[in-house]
Image: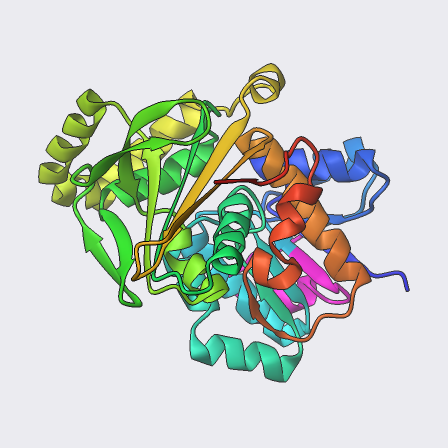
Amino acid sequence: MNRTWMIYGANGYTGNLIAEMAAKRGLTPILAGRNKEKIQALAKKLQLESRVFPLEQLDQLTAGLSGIDLVLHCAGPFSKTSSLMIEGCFSAGTHYLDITGEINVFEHVHSNEVAERAIRANIVLCSGVGFDVIPTDCVALKLQQLLPSATHLSLGFDSDSGISRGTFKTMIQGLASGSAERQDGIIKEFPLGTKNRIIDFGRGSKTAVAIPWGDVSTAFYSTGIPNINTWIPMSPTKMHATRVLNKFKPVIASSLIQRFLHKWIDTKVSGPSLSSRQNSPAYIWGEAHNARGEKITVRIKTANVYTLTIYGALEVVTRLLNQKVSGGSYTPSSLFGPELIEALPESDAFQIS
């Protein structure tokens, strides 16, 4: 059966990369967004169809999704756009995927109300089908399978990946809040830079800092493990600077400063080049332990952050279009198992210790 799908936000850095790879593979997504000039130019370049519509008016959004079986939502910041697109998907009967890493978006998708609506509508909702959070989510479920009695889960990654405009803007918004972890099933915030440990992500031991990565939310729904924290490498000097920034959270959170920083990003940040992406793989690490002190560690090496997002998003799109899946709210690993990450190009097999 020929099914129709869409990339919304195809003119953004990551959406553009996904659209180009889709066309290269002979796939035919409809490219969409709100910027008519950029969307139509990209569609012409890739010889694909296009649609232009905003998200704020449900009737226009529903019309824009008419006849679409699945939308891959790439237009951030997702904390502002995701719930709007999901409502459009409910109205149009369209499966929803996105590439977010934002905890509040994941919590919305997996809330009882939204999940039950998805079941009734028989549509699939799956956030985080890129680097956020496919590799760490798959490591999380692999660990739970290896140690079903696990009560604590730690996840993290190490990559010299560079950064896109959208990711940078999300980080700037994050500075206004803080870090987060899950304790006894509840997400709790704490100041950035205040929790650290030594971790070998896969290329030697490094000082690491706890961050509010999406798995604080998603890994709970994938595994049921109640205590979850997430980590990246960071030097002691940068950790100290992060702790200093905590004192300026009210200033950073102000709408004036946020607008200024977003405009600066638009003029100064373009995203990593192809050569940069080709030479900066990602190293994923996870550790689980139970009440008896038993511990298991899993590592996997993958493609660059942005390259893996391309591979992951297209893999999930292709599988979902070609397989029958019951409606509901999913994580990538709960949808297709922990081996999903091993199926992606440039990903090694799990290393278990």
Answer whether residue 65 is magenta in the image. yes
User: Could one spot residue 60 in this view of the protein?
Assistant: no
Quadrant containing the N terminus is: bottom right
Q: Residue furthest left?
A: 247
Q: How many marks?
A: 0
Rendered view: 336 above or below 281: below
Left or right of 85? Residue 207 is left
Residue at 57% x, 47% y: name it. 74
Left or right of 320? Residue 102 is left
Q: Which residues are magenta?
A: 52-71
Q: Position of residue 101 (x, y in %)?
A: 45, 48
Rendered view: 181 above or below 201: below
Left or right of 91? Residue 200 is left
Quadrant of the image occupied by residue 11: top right
Rendered view: 304 above or below 130: above
Q: Position of residue 309 (x, y in %)?
A: 59, 40
Quadrant of the image occupied by residue 67: bottom right
Q: Residue furthest bottom?
A: 120
Q: How is the image coloured?
A: rainbow
Quadrant of the image occupied by residue 14: top right
Rendered view: 315 above or below 88: above
Q: Position of residue 213 (x, y in %)?
A: 37, 47
- Front one among 97 and 4: 97
Answer whether residue 258 is magenta in the image. no
User: Could one spot residue 135 in this view of the protein?
Assistant: yes
Left or right of 339? Residue 163 is left
Residue at 46% x, 64% y: name it. 148
Residue at 44% x, 79% y: name it. 112
- Front one among 192 and 21: 192
